[in-house]
Amino acid sequence: MKISRFEVFAIGDGPGVDPDKGGVEPLACIRIHTDGGLIGFSEVFRVPPGVVKATVGGPDTHFGRLLLGQEITHPERLWQLVWDAFIHTNRRGWEIMILGALDVAIWDIYGQMLNQPVWQLLGGVQRGPFQTPFGQQVEVTPYCTLVSDVWGGEPMFTQQVARAERLAELGYRAFKVEPMFSTPTDVVEMARRFRKTLGTAPTLMVDVGYLFNDVPTAVRVCRELEEFNVYFFETPFPVDVPDAYAKLAAKTSIPLAMGEHAVTRWEFLDMMDRGQVAVMQPYMTTCGGLTEAKRIVELAVPRGAIVCPGNWSTQILGAASVHLAAYSPITPFIEFAPAEVFDSPLRQELQNAGFPVRDGVISLPTRPGIGYELPREIEKKYQLS
Ligand SMILES: [Mg+2]
């Protein structure tokens, strides 16, 4: 079965819905068609749709010239074919993010070809009975990312806590507060308010969105956060300073997390080894695809790190995260942007079409491939020109 054609289109909520309030920003989607009739699908987060349209198309385009006519064999072969062709080009950024999306779509086709869900082909479930609480099935647990319409102070605390309460009632078990664009005092207060209202049972993560430049301030904040049982502390510093991460990691018991914009396993390796970061957060497309994400898991295992796939995009990307989590022995959570608390009709419809969350968990998918089908009505209704 060979790759015969690419189809690229963009969907979004449109200018009426603010992406910072949960709206889906213009999002390129790719379908890979094959001569055997199977179709692979993926979204491409954070790459301008025009870039995807210009590079993924006919035989004269950047990716078309490499992949059109290629036989679908193991996705790793096709990944390597493209990667090798990049040796004299930029090897990071949009080039890898688009490769990542193509890789997810190729895994989707490969799974359909072999009539297996992708997680089976990534290696099957690798958490054995000794790593799973007795009597519990292997499932995938989403954590909800909470944002607010305003940042800092009382309105931020109130809105994020209210959203967490609503989601907890719906059965979600883990939450990430986002005291971004705020002060060290606000960061600590955000965690305090969460615990005061939600109690000790839910898992709590804290993401400060690159709030600090200096280690001593971040150390003081982490010391104060320790009493709130914080599962991880995300992106205290810009990610180009692994030494700052390492200095903070040495002074706090809270695991540090990063990786939302990191591309290739090499950036993750650097943050684990030089940055002493314990929680890797690759996006399944941004990092370079499921092929690269599996390699990140394989690098994290011997280092004792964990991999919690990031996803502030839609459940099209979330479907790929579920497959990685099903296979990975070190993935207790995947990130989830819960449509229930955002004013985005598209986010809600894409979530409805995805794997259902029941009692706070997602069952392992059974359909061949990735198993996410974008309903044609959604595609038509939200298509951007
Ligand atoms: Mg973040």
Image (cartoon, rainbow, N blue to C red):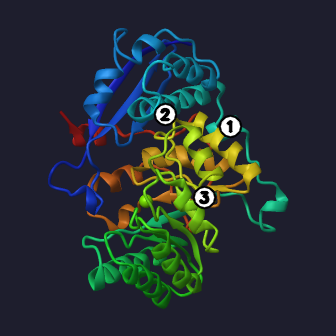
**What's the residue at 65%, 38% (across, down)?**
295
* Mark 1: amino acid: Leu
- Residue 36, percent from left and from top: 52, 14
Give the residue drawn at x 59%, y 82%.
201
Is residue 302 left or right of 159 when viewed as pictured?
right
Against 287, residue 239 (above or below) is below
Counting residues from the start of the chain, the first of labels 1 and 2 encountered is 2
State the mark number for residue 258: none
Residue at 40% across, 15% down: 64
Crowding at mark 2 (Cα within 10 Å: few <14, some 14-19, many 20+): many
Quadrant where the C terminus is found in the figure:
top left
* 10 Å crowding of disc 3: few (<14), some (14-19), many (20+): many
Q: Point out the frontmost of discs 3 and 2.
A: 3
- In the foreground, 72 or 149: 149
**What is the three-letter code of the residue carrying label 3?**
Val
Task: Give the mark nearer the N terminus: 3 vs 1.
Answer: 1
Disc nearest the viewer among 1 and 2: 2
Task: Report the residue marked by disc 3.
Answer: 277
